Image: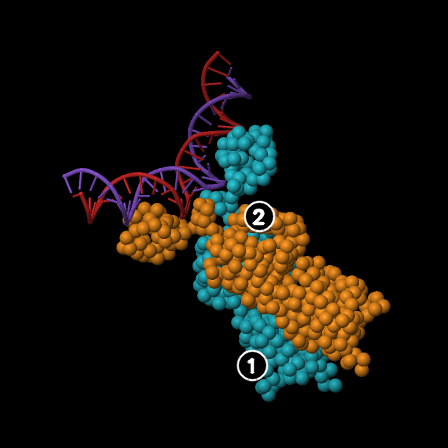
Chain colours: A orange, B cyan, C purple, D red
Amino acid sequence: MKVTIYEVAERAGVSIATVSKVINNTGKMRDSTRLKVMKVMKELNYSPNPMASALTGKRTGTFGLLVPDISNPFFSEIARTIEDRAHERGMSIFICSTDENEGKEKKYLELLRRKQVDGLIIASSFHNKTSLKELKDSQVPLVLLTQDDPSLGITSVSVDDFVGGFEATSHLLSKGHQNIVIIAETTPSSKMRIYGYREAHERYGLNFKEDNVIRTTASIINGKECLQQIFDKEDIPTAIFACNDLIAIGVMQGAKGRGIVIPEDLSIVGFDNTILATTTVPALTTISQPIKDMGTKVVDIIIDEIKGKNVSRERVLFLPKLIERETTAEIQEKVK
Amino acid sequence: MKVTIYEVAERAGVSIATVSKVINNTGKMRDSTRLKVMKVMKELNYSPNPMASALTGKRTGTFGLLVPDISNPFFSEIARTIEDRAHERGMSIFICSTDENEGKEKKYLELLRRKQVDGLIIASSFHNKTSLKELKDSQVPLVLLTQDDPSLGITSVSVDDFVGGFEATSHLLSKGHQNIVIIAETTPSSKMRIYGYREAHERYGLNFKEDNVIRTTASIINGKECLQQIFDKEDIPTAIFACNDLIAIGVMQGAKGRGIVIPEDLSIVGFDNTILATTTVPALTTISQPIKDMGTKVVDIIIDEIKGKNVSRERVLFLPKLIERETTAEIQEKVK
DNA sequence: GTTGGTTAGGAAAATGGTTTCCTCGTTGCA
DNA sequence: TGCAACGAGGAAACCATTTTCCTAACCAAC
C-alpha cells in the first residue's frame, strides 16, 4: 500500500539504485534522468521509508530529550521551543521524564539507544556521573541543557547559574535584607546558584551561613514544607531565594497559611520565570532564563554535532535576567 | 558493534530463525533450546533492532500524541501521565504541538505516518473534520482525547463536557448569579460546555442569551482581553465561566487591572484544574478533569486497538468535578 | 579502427530482522 | 518391522533502502 522505491524506479524506467541516488543527491547522472525520477516521486507522492534508511546506517531523524518532568512548566515551555525548532529542521523528538531517578534515567537511555536516536539532549541532572561519562565516550551526539558541569567536558547550553544566584541575592541585599535563606535543589546548577548567593554576600561584606542553605527537590509541596521548617526555627529570615518558581510558589502558599504577608513580612525571589510566576498574586519576582533562545540553540548544536561539524566542545551560557515583580520589597517596610 | 541476531544464533548454535522464534515466543521448540538461546541473549545483552522489525511489518512501538500546545499546563500534565503509562507498557511517544493550526496538523500527521507510528492519540481539535475522517478510514489506530464528537464515530476518551458546563454554571446560579458570561473556545468540547451552561439556565428557569457567549482561544492574554470587552459593555455580568484555566486567569488579571475585586465584585469558574488554579490568589474555583485516569485509559485503549482487540468504537466519558476554591461567592455579598 | 578514459546507470550485497515452508529425526501404532 | 504423523529447527525469501562495485556506451586520440 505504501509506495516504495521499486515503484518509483519502474515508473521512471530506471533502477532503484538510481532513484536512491536522486533521493540522496549523490552520484552522477544526466539531468534529464534526475528530473524524470523527481517527477515520478512527486506524482506518486513518494517518500522513503525511514526504517529502511535507518537500517542501512543512515540517521533516523529523531533525538531524545530527557527532562526531569514534562509537567513542570519550565520544562514543558522549553520542550515546546525545542520541539518547534526540531521540526523546523526536520527532526522529531522523544520526550522522557526521568523524575531525576537513576533507574528511569538508565531505562530511558537504553530505550533511546535502541530506537537509534541520532542524538540526546539531556536536561535531567544525572546524579550518576559515571553513566554520563559513558554516554559521552559512546560517541552519541550529546548536549547538556540547563546544567553545566565543567568537569565533564560535555557540550552544554544553560543559563549562567552563578550570575543568576548572584543577581537574585544582590537584589534582595540591595533592598536591605540581611538574613536571606536560599532553598536549593541538589543539582549542579543549584550548586552554582548557591555560589552566586555566597558571592553576593561577600560583596556586601556579609558572612555566608551554611545554615541558610536548605535543600529540597522541585515541587510546590516541598516549597511549602520548607517554609514551615524555616519558620519553626528561631532565626527567621526576611527574605527567601527559591531556586525555582515551583518552590517559590510553595513558599508563598506556606506563608499565606501562616498569615505571613508577602512582600511586607517576607520577600521572595524565584527562578525560571515560568508562566506560574505571572499568575500568582502578588506576582513573583524571579530570574528569567531565555527559554526560547536556549531551546533553539540546543537544537542547532545537536544537529551540528550529528552532522559531524563542531566537534569542539562548546559551553554556551546565556545571561539570566532579574524580573522584578511584586514579591520583593525594601526591608524598611517591614520595620514600619 | 551492536549485537545482532546472527551473533546470538551462532553463540547458541542455532539458526537465526530459531532465535527469532524465541524473541517472539512463537513456534515450537525444546525448552532446553529456548533456554539456551535466552541465556545467550542475556549474556550478550542483546535486544532486537526495532528498525529491522518494523521493516518486516511488525510494530514500531511508538505512537503519536497531537496536542494543541505542550507548554499549556493542562496538556503537559496529561502528556506526562500518557508518557508514564506508555512506557509502562513498552511504548514511546512522539509529541507534537499543533497550535490548532490546520497546516501543522497536516504536516505532523504526515510526519507521524512516515515514522510508522502504531497509533495516534489526538488531543488537538481538528477543525478540519475531513482529514479526521480520512484518518479514521485509513486504518491507523486512533483515539480522540479530550474531545468527543459523536458524529465522527471515533473512539474517544474525554470528560463529560456537558456535565462540566452544567456543574460550573449551576454552581454559579446556586450562588444567586443571574447574569453569567461564558467564555468559550471554538472547539467541540467548548460547544458541549455551552450546552451544559444553557441547560443549567433552563433548570433555573432563566433564558439563555446568545450575547452572553464569548468566543476566544486559550491563553491568558485572550482572557484578559475578553474581560476588557465584557466590562466595556453596559450589561455587566456578576460571574464569568471561563472554559479553561488559562482564560480564567486572564480574566482575573484583567479584573485586577480594573480594580474589580474577586470574588466580591465578580465570581469566576475555570475549567481543567491545572496547577495554575492552585497558584493564583485567590485560588481558582474550577472544574477538574481526572487527568491521570484519562491519560492511563487513553493509552490502554490505543494499545488494545493496536493489538486488534476492541474493534468496537468506544466512547469513554469521565465525570468532571467542581473544585470550589476562592473565586466564587454568593451574589448577596456584592449587594452588601 | 583500436585503445583508453569517462560516465551514466545497473546488479547485487548488505542491513537485521520475520515468516513461510521444508526437512529430518523421532515416536506411536498396527 | 514398517509407515504415518508429528515436532524441532533450519533454509531462504522478503521488507525498503544504501552503497559498492561493474558494465556498457560514448568519445577522443593515436
Disc 2 crowd, CA 10 A, few/some/many (<14, 14-19, 20+) = few
Secondary structure under tag 2 reads: helix
Q: Residue at x 53, y 53 (%)?
A: A141
Q: Residue at x 82, y 70 (%)?
A: A236
Answer left or right for A234 relative to D23: right
> Label 1 amino acid?
Asp
- Please tell me in which quadrant of the rendered image residue B278 appears: bottom right
Can residue A88 be seen at all in this image of the molecule?
Answer: yes
> Label 2 amino acid?
Asp
User: Percent x, y for residue A224?
Assistant: 75, 66
User: Percent x, y for residue A233?
Assistant: 84, 66
> How many angstroms separate mark 2 from mark 1 (CA)?
65 Å
Q: Nearer the viewer, residue B125 or A89?
A: A89
| Quarter placement of the C terminus of chain A | bottom right
Q: Considering only vertical position in the picture, is C13 above or below B119?
A: above
Mark 1 lies on residue: B211
Which chain is mark 1 on?
B
Mark 2 lies on residue: A137
Secondary structure under tag 1 reads: helix
Can residue B91 be seen at all in this image of the molecule?
Answer: no
Q: Residue at x 51, y 54 (%)?
A: A311
